[in-house]
Image: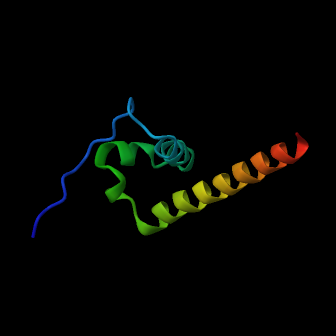
Amino acid sequence: MSKKKERKIDLNDLTPEEACKLEIAEEIGVYDKVMEGGWRVLSAKESGRIGGILSKRKRAREKQEAQNEKAK
């Protein structure tokens, strides 16, 4: 079996979604864990929590943008 290459997180080359994920990781207290071992070291519970918060923020942002479009 081939092993996946471990990719270090490059803080200078982040997509907006990756930046948001890191921000959430910092808020829930797993930032250091992610920086040391990457996203693969998180438990399913931690990953799910980050994903849930990310989805919630994305929906809120889209709703806000839709309201701003209606206001114009």
Q: Is residue 65 left or right of residue 58?
A: right
Percent across and percent down for residue 16 are: 51, 41
Q: Residue furthest top?
A: 12
Instruction: Please identify the residue farthest to the front as the structure is shown.
Output: 72
Residue at left offset 82%, top offset 45%: 69
Q: Could you tell whether 21 is left or right of 37 in the image?
A: right
Residue 3: x, y in percent? 14, 61
Rendered image coloring scheme: rainbow
> Which residue is found at the position 9% from the left and 70% from the top?
1
The structure residue drawn at horizontal position 64% and vertical position 53%, both measured from the top left corner, is 58
- The residue sitting at 38% across, 33% down in the picture is 13
Q: Position of residue 64 (x, y in %)?
A: 78, 48
Picture coordinates of residue 61, whole percent (x, y): 70, 48
Query: Does residue 71 appear to the left or right of 46 in the view shown?
Result: right
Asked whether 41 or 55 is in front, the reply is 55
Q: Quadrant of residue 71?
A: top right
Asked if 3 appears above or below 1 in the picture, the reply is above
Quadrant including the C terminus = top right
When asked about the image quadrant of residue 43, the answer is bottom left
